[in-house]
Image: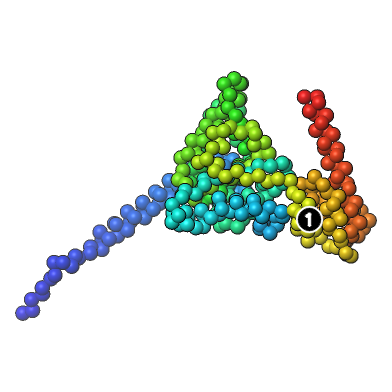
Amino acid sequence: MVTTITNPAVATVNPREKALEDFRKKIMEHKEIEARLKQKVDPLVYNMSHEDPGDVSFSEVGGLSEQIRELREVVELPLTNPELFQRVGITPPKGCLLFGPPGTGKTLLARAVASQLDCNFLKVVSSAIVDKYIGESARMIREMFAYARDHQPCIIFMDEIDAIGGRRFSEGTSADREIQRTLMELLNQMDGFDTLGKVKIIMATNRPDTLDPALMRPGRLDRKIEIPLPNEQARLDILKIHAAPIAKRGDIDYEAIVKLSDGFNGADMRNVCTEAGMFAIRVERDYVQEDDFSKAVRKVAESKKLESKLDYKAQGTS
């Protein structure tokens, strides 16, 4: 007679119990998926998240090498190499403010840094957040930051921040008080996330003097980067970048063209290239010559003079 000795240390797996356990796990997975699906995302936040930064590289940004370095230190370095800050023992900045005249490349810089990183990008036009219903704007800010936390790494780019970030005052209409509540919610959200987390904020304005001091203090916007009007060398770099894809014939003296562009911003230099192409199309040519660039820069200069006159008249009547 053979005696079978069973080892009590080896547990016998009941197929029925195993099937039930697998079934419970599947139910939990389905419940988790269902809970995520039930989370409603505001349509405006959804549209922000589907803003494509485009295929923009830093090589397409001319004359701003120092500003690019400072921006990458604030946004890119903490996302790609957070251990550097931990080793040194410093806290990385939460965000930065880009300020300067219109058309100098603030939005282009934000798109470039987002394009270089494999991360989510929320582009927020601050004036679009302000809602006519009390409390809706603050709710939008909360949902925006909640979405960014759930989809890390994420860059929040808030353009025209002066629309909601202006100085607070005691007097004002109900609309002014709603904007102040929105600003307070923004400050609360900025204080509420981890500096070592993977959510970074870039704000842009051409009116930094109107912003509330609480928004500007270190710990919220740690670095302020000025994007000035380009100097002559920067305008030359910008012109060459935008002229590169254009079909051209003959030698083109870019330096002579830039001499006529005093006071131009980056957008104006791009407009010079567009107008040069339009002059070529007007005479049924499929290439651009130096004369087209010369006429284009003079035309853009005349347009800027007209803009200055209109601004002067508007200020005089206000």
Crowding at mark 1 (Cα within 10 Å: few <14, some 14-19, many 20+) = many
Q: Nearer the viewer, residue 220 or 29?
A: 220
Q: Nearer the viewer, residue 69 or 173?
A: 69
Q: Name the spot of residue 155 as percent of width and height, x first.
A: 56, 49
Rendered image quadrant of residue 206? top right
Q: Amino acid at mark 1?
A: Leu
Instruction: Say which residue appears at 81% left-offset and 26% top-offset.
Output: 316
* Residue 163 makes an appearance in the image: no
Instruction: Say which residue appears at 70% left-offset and 55% top-offset.
Output: 61
Rendered image quadrant of residue 302? top right
Label 1 SS = helix
Count of marks, rendered view: 1
Q: Name the spot of residue 275 as percent of width and height, x first.
A: 85, 51
Compared to 225, does 292 lie above or below? below
Q: Name the spot of residue 288 as percent of width and height, x first.
A: 87, 59
Image quarter of the C terminus: top right
Q: Name the spot of residue 37 as percent of width and height, x first.
A: 47, 47
Instruction: Say which residue appears at 67% left-offset and 36% top-offset.
Output: 207
Image quarter of the N terminus: bottom left
Q: Is residue 181 left or right of residue 205?
A: left
Disc 1 target residue: 236
Q: Nearer the viewer, residue 42 or 75?
A: 75
Instruction: Determine the residue located farthest toward the right in the rendered image.
Output: 283
Compared to 55, does 104 lie above or below? above
